[in-house]
Image (spheres, rainbow, N blue to C red):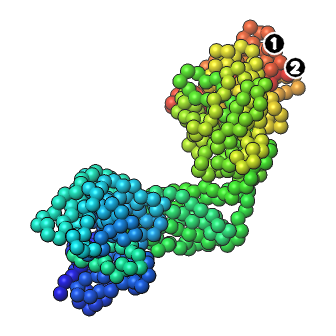
């Protein structure tokens, strides 16, 4: 009686694998195996392909062996060609060779009759990592079939060594050695054969043995993607997750209990009611752990995108002449009540009198922008922020498709990739900068003054001459500057044209330094210098310079610094308009 031996970890990471003997003496495939069981028969203690038509047969069993692992297999087969060959799946993440699984396999035979070591991607495409000499798997003279024993060893450092032994050979021959660490985990090992109708019953597998231990898993699962249908929301993870440990916070429109697919890596929620096209949805997955207990928390923010129309997106800031070492950027705002997808759009530039051209797609991956949300588009986030106050990563779209902008002025355009419809287009010019702007505008962005008009001015010195991802200082009216009392201060203008900065503080002891600047960054007035403040009060400014002269009609930036002996330092900036 012969046996096919499987050494399986039974999904217990970090432990040495125990060896399991699968006994075929009962002439049946044991429980725990997956595959096309109806296309095999067991007889004489071995596994034989059995089919009446051309096709494929495969059988998989759980196996987590990777560190110090060794795989063995004996195969009797027809002399191989392009339509008759064997695959020995060594370390694989699926109990099926169909599209979607990934891992390593040994191909035994092809048109050149050689042994090939391959990595299969989830897409189904394969990469050849190494191969033996041609004609290695040639049948003995006078026959049309051959017997081959294969052996594969993998070190803890990812060094693979492949051996083979043909009939009549006394010892294994090392075919090749290669180092690859693309995959370091395994869930299954399997055997597979492909055949034409005339050879459908000519494959036999024996002495299938896997030993070794699993690589210690210390990496939490990764959310790879999510998908929406009319009635479901699904999350795809990089590995199997433990549903029992998962908790979540869901939108009210979601059913409470998700379903996990057979591979254990896709979580699907059903909807109680249809999607709202303009809504912002948020799913919090807490305690999302793999089978080894590695855990991660994640928040998925998404919506149902619709097609962008002209005026849905507006340019709000343009940095066309950054300082040396910094990066160009444009800022856009979603001026609609729709969720839009920036991957549907292209960005282009042109000089003032040049014909319009249509640029490259901004980004291949879906990138949503919600109603009222700002997005900064640049080639390099680090080249934008520097010493500036920047929002989090979600406010940035980093892309190589941002066409260079001309320092002397020109047009910037957003258009739909599908039909080249122009969604937004504006003309910028360094002459839009205010008089006296530092460095002739180098390192100073142009900011839109109003979403209702195509008017531009220099960014405020109070923000470092740029405000990527934040509301423009130039857009702030008096209503925007009226802060609640617990936010320290709000300004108002009386009938005499005097600005009053009313404040309410959390405790006594603060002193104030308050100064006024032109939009070019030049200090024009000192309103207060180390002035002790009461808990509630107000400061005033009549719009005069430190020399007592009335300042020209223009907007000014008031910078208010509050210092407390305990070490608290507060700062507020306001835009005020002198309009007498």
Residue 413: x %, y % from top left:
73, 36
- Asked which secondary structure carries label 2, the reply is loop
- Asked which secondary structure carries label 1, the reply is loop
110 over 335 or under it: above or below? below
Residue at image point 79% right, 9% down: 549
Contact check, label 2 and label 1, Cβ < 8 Å:
yes
517 over 389 or under it: above or below? above
Residue farthest toward the bottom in the current orientation of the protein: 26
Residue 3: x %, y % from top left:
21, 82
Dividing the picture into quarters, in which one does residue 478 lie? top right
Residue at image point 59% right, 50% down: 365
Residue at image point 43% right, 78% down: 54
Name the residue nearer the viewer: 544 or 300: 300
287 over 481 or under it: above or below? below
In the picture, which quadrant includes the N terminus?
A: bottom left
Dividing the picture into quarters, in which one does residue 430 lie? top right
In the picture, which quadrant includes the C terminus?
A: top right
Residue 253 in the figure: left or right of residue 564: right
Name the residue nearer the viewer: 14 or 3: 3
Residue at image point 80% right, 29% down: 455
Dividing the picture into quarters, in which one does residue 306 lie? bottom right
Q: How crowded is mark 2: few (under 14 residues within 10 Å), some or many (20 or more)?
A: few
Q: Alpha-carbon distance for marks 2 and 1?
A: 10 Å
Total number of numbered discs in the rendering = 2
Name the residue nearer the viewer: 422 or 127: 127
Residue farthest toward the top in the current orientation of the protein: 547
Q: Name the residue under label 1.
A: 550
Q: Mark 2 points at which residue?
A: 580
Residue 463: x %, y % from top left:
64, 28
């Amino acid at each position: 009686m012969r046996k096919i031996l499987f050494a399986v970890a039974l999904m217990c990471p970090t432990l040495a694998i125990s060896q399991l003997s699968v006994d075929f003496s009962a002439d049946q495939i044991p429980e725990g195996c997956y595959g096309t069981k109806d296309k095999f028969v067991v007889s004489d203690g071995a596994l034989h392909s059995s089919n009446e038509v051309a096709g494929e047969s495969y059988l998989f069993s759980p196996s987590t062996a990777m560190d110090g692992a060794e795989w063995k297999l004996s195969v009797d087969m027809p002399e191989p060609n392009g339509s008759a060959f064997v695959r020995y799946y060594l370390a694989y993440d699926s109990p099926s060779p169909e599209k979607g699984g990934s891992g390593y396999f040994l191909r035994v035979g092809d048109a050149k009759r050689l042994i090939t070591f391959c990595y299969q991607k989830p897409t189904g495409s394969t990469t050849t990592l190494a191969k033996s000499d041609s004609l290695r798997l040639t049948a003995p003279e006078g026959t049309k079939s051959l017997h081959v024993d294969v052996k594969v060893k993998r070190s803890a450092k990812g060094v693979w060594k492949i051996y083979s032994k043909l009939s009549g050979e006394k010892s294994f021959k090392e075919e090749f050695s290669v180092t690859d660490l693309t995959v370091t985990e395994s869930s299954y090992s399997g055997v597979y054969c492909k055949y034409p109708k005339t050879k459908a019953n000519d494959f036999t597998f024996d002495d299938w043995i896997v030993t070794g231990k699993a690589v210690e898993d210390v990496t939490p699962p990764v959310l790879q993607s999510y998908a929406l249908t009319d009635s479901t929301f699904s999350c795809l993870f990089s590995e199997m997750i433990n549903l029992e440990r998962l908790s979540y916070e869901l939108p009210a429109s979601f059913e409470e209990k998700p379903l996990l697919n057979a591979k254990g890596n896709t979580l699907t929620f059903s909807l109680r009611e249809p999607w709202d096209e303009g809504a912002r949805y948020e799913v919090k997955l807490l305690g999302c752990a793999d089978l080894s207990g590695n855990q991660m928390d994640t928040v998925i923010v998404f919506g149902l995108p619709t097609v962008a129309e002209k005026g849905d997106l507006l340019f709000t800031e343009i940095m066309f002449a950054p300082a040396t070492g910094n990066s160009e950027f444009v800022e856009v705002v979603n001026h609609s009540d729709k969720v839009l997808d920036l991957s549907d759009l292209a960005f282009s530039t042109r000089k003032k009198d040049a014909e319009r051209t249509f640029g490259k797609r901004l980004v291949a991956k879906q990138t949503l922008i919600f109603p009222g949300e700002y997005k900064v588009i640049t080639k390099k986030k680090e080249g934008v922020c520097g010493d500036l106050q920047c929002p989090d990563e979600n406010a940035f779209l980093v892309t190589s498709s941002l066409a260079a902008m001309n320092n002397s002025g020109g047009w910037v355009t957003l258009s739909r990739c599908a039909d080249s419809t122009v969604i937004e287009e504006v003309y910028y010019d360094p002459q839009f900068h205010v008089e006296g702007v530092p460095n002739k505008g180098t390192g100073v962005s142009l900011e839109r003054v109003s979403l209702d008009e195509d008017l531009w001015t220099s960014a405020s010195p109070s923000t470092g001459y740029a405000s990527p991802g934040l509301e423009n200082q130039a857009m702030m009216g008096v209503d925007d500057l009226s802060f609640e009392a617990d936010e320290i201060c709000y300004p108002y203008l009386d009938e005499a044209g005097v600005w009053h900065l009313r404040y309410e503080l959390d405790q006594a002891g603060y002193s104030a330094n308050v100064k006024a600047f032109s939009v070019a960054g030049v200090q024009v007035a000192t309103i207060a210098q180390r002035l002790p403040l009461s808990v509630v009060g107000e400061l005033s400014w009549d719009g005069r310079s430190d020399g007592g002269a009335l300042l020209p009609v223009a907007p000014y930036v008031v910078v208010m610094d509050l210092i407390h002996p305990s070490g608290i330092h507060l700062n507020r900036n306001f835009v005020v308009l002198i309009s007498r």
